[in-house]
Amino acid sequence: MKNKKIDASIVISFYNNTQALSCIIRALECQNNNFEVIIADDGSENDKISEVLNIIKNSPLSIQHIWQSDNGFRKNRILNKAIKASRSDYIIFIDGDCTPQRHFVQDHLKNREVGTVLNGRRVDLASSFKNKLYETPKPESFFENNKLEIFSKYLIGHGKNIEKGIRIKSSILSNLLNRKNKGIVGCNFSLYKKDLININGFDNRYEVPGVGEDSDIEYRLKKSGVRVKNIFYQAVILHLMHPELTRVKLAQELLNDTIEKQQIVALNGYLQADDVK
């Protein structure tokens, strides 16, 4: 795969969780598409970096590891650096704790359009599935192979958005299910690189979790003329439930300021990502 034409760059937001990363890479190895992987590492520790390099060494995929020093939550900055390192004109973003299912890459590529950002979702599995997911020999088929147990636990209150794991192939039904406007989630979306560069990528000023990696990028993309297309019930990824990061007031204030000024191009973004190490 390393010498074939690259149809997409898959950017994985990562920090220390090598157990999840190994599961993701194994799932990606079973995708029938030509792509590269970029691990966007926001300051993992040295021992974890050694594990990452070992994962890369043992994978047939073309994988880059882009690292920056740990200076707090700087996800947007490392994402911009990953965009700079990407070799494809199409980029798919996922988080480092989200395991793609078998047709994940295929679904993104078949729906791609210039001037369009594809908006996916994630299945939130009960945390009790952690060991079973990470240890399975076929992580790309985990939902299909364990759907009875997954839905059984969902019915008694364990899990969220489990129905999003059902892959809908009918275009008529898919269009019906995707007709509502929904916001982008940073763990599963894709678009052409040029549409990102046109708005100077992600805003590096967001150094707290919250809205910087999805709501802000969605607002500025839409203001630039890019439309949002939902691909729910396709491009399935699995995520283990955990306590959500606290949304910091500063992030919302930055977004409010961007909207008030109708700022389309980030003043501190893709072009400035390398200014700070």
Image (cartoon, rainbow, N blue to C red):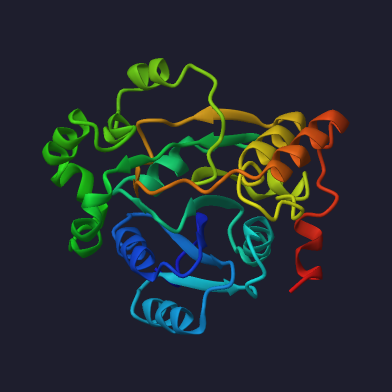
Residue 43 at x, y = what percent? 58, 72
Q: Quadrant of the C terminus?
A: bottom right
Q: In which quarter of the image is the N terminus?
A: bottom left
Residue 129 at x, y = what percent? 22, 51
The quadrant in which residue 276 appears is bottom right
Horizontal arrangement in the rendering, residue 258 relative to residue 159 (left or right): right
Residue 146 at x, y = what percent? 14, 45
Along the line of sight, which residue is nearer the eye, 204 or 103? 204
Q: Which residue is drawn at 47% across and 71% down?
A: 63
Q: Which residue is drawn at 76% across and 38% down?
A: 253
Q: Residue at x 48, y 51 (%)?
A: 94
Horizontal arrangement in the rendering, residue 53 relative to residue 71 (left or right): left
Along the line of sight, which residue is nearer the eye, 110 or 85? 85
For the image, the number of numbered tags is: 0
- 113 shown above or below 13: above
Residue 158 at x, y = what percent? 24, 37
- 262 shown above or below 214: above
Q: Which residue is drawn at 52% across and 50% down?
A: 92
Horizontal arrangement in the rendering, residue 135 relative to residue 272 (left or right): left
Horizontal arrangement in the rendering, residue 153 relative to residue 163 (left or right): left
- 234 shown above or below 276: above
